[in-house]
Image: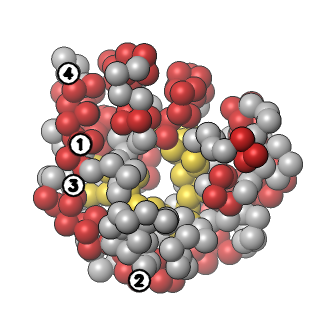
């Protein structure tokens, strides 16, 4: 089964957040090869593990099977800096609302300005859609509808909804269904909720929704071998054409990557 990893992580200092996991570029690249992936998006996180745009892409460029996504904090960086990021060679940006302390309701103006600038530059956004955390940091609004309000003003922006909306997977799937500039990434959600009813939802999407979803590992949180095993299980019985769409064609077409 051919897979291109939509969402892998590596860091400048080789560490992963505050864990003991190995997040070096070298390890991620070697794991892709070892598990027969044809490549992977290597995604940075703004403000984490010595991240800087220049350092991140300098290391990434040493590995031919890695395709870099810049970590971007729209509360600290201006939309004007996005053209610089694109000129460095990044394929897109990653926005992480929890880590950056972004409020989808009160920070809408900054998000809209960022999204619109990305549309003008044809720069896709990898947007984290997992909002669960400690009570004091949990949003007291529904992130789905706040995001919907932003997207209505940025209809030309290409967005990969990272982690599939978590337990709201089907709501985000229906959103992506009717909007060709949205793609739904199943990283985290296909691993975190094993043996729950979400397994049935994912199987349904793979059977009936194969042109709007894609597979990410969330490496180093999950191993690439475990992702392959889960994909094989969840896609059992579906046509090979659909597996290929989910496994690599959708993401490569969406990002206009030729291998």
Q: Nearer the viewer, residue 84 or 97?
A: 97
Q: Quadrant of the C terminus?
A: bottom left
Which marked residue is nearer to the observer: mark 3 or mark 1?
Answer: 1
Which picture quadrant has residue 142?
top right
- Rounded to the nearest whole Å, what is the CA distance between mark 1 and mark 2? 29 Å
Res 42 quadrant in image: bottom left
Judging by the rendered image, the residue that carries numbered circle 1 is 226
- Residue pictured at 80% horizontal, 58% vertical: 110
Left or right of 223: which side holds 53?
Answer: right
Image quadrant in which you'd find residue 58: bottom left
Image marks 3 and 1: residues in contact by CB distance under 8 Å: no
The mark lying in front, picked from 4 and 1, is: 1
Question: Disc 1 or 2, which lies upstream in sequence?
Answer: 2
Q: Secondary structure at mark 1?
A: helix
What numbered label is drawn on residue 109? none
Q: Is residue 200 above or below residue 60?
A: above
Residue 159 visible within the image: no
| Position of residue 205 in the picture relative to residue 31 (left or right) | right
Characterize the local packing of mark 4: few (<14), some (14-19) or many (20 or more) Cα atoms within 10 angstroms.
Answer: some
Q: Nearer the viewer, mark 4 or mark 3?
A: 4
Q: Tags 2 and 4 in contact by the CB under 8 Å rule?
A: no
What residue did someone put label 3 on?
Answer: 38
């Amino acid at each position: 089964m051919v897979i291109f990893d939509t969402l892998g992580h590596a860091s400048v200092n080789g560490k992963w957040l505050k864990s003991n996991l190995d997040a070096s570029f070298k390890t991620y690249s070697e794991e892709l090869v070892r598990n027969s992936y044809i490549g992977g998006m290597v995604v940075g996180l703004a403000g984490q593990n010595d991240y800087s745009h220049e350092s991140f892409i300098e290391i990434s460029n040493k590995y031919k099977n890695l395709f870099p996504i810049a970590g971007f904090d729209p509360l600290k960086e201006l939309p004007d800096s996005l053209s610089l990021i694109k000129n460095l060679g990044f394929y897109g940006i990653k926005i992480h609302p929890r880590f950056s302390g972004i409020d989808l309701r009160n920070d809408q103006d900054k998000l809209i300005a960022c999204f619109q600038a990305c549309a003008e530059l044809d720069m896709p956004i990898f947007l984290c859609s997992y909002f669960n955390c400690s009570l004091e940091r949990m949003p007291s609004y529904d992130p789905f509808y706040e995001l919907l309000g932003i997207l209505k003003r940025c209809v030309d922006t290409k967005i990969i909804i990272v982690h599939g909306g978590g337990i709201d997977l089907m709501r985000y799937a229906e959103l992506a269904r009717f909007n060709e500039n949205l793609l739904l990434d199943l990283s985290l959600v296909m691993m975190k909720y094993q043996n729950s009813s979400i397994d049935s939802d994912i199987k349904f999407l793979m059977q009936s929704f194969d042109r709007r979803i894609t597979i990410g590992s969330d490496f180093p949180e999950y191993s690439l071998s475990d992702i392959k095993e889960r994909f094989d299980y969840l896609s059992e019985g579906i046509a090979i054409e659909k597996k290929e769409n989910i496994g690599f064609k959708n993401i490569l077409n969406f990002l206009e990557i030729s291998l």
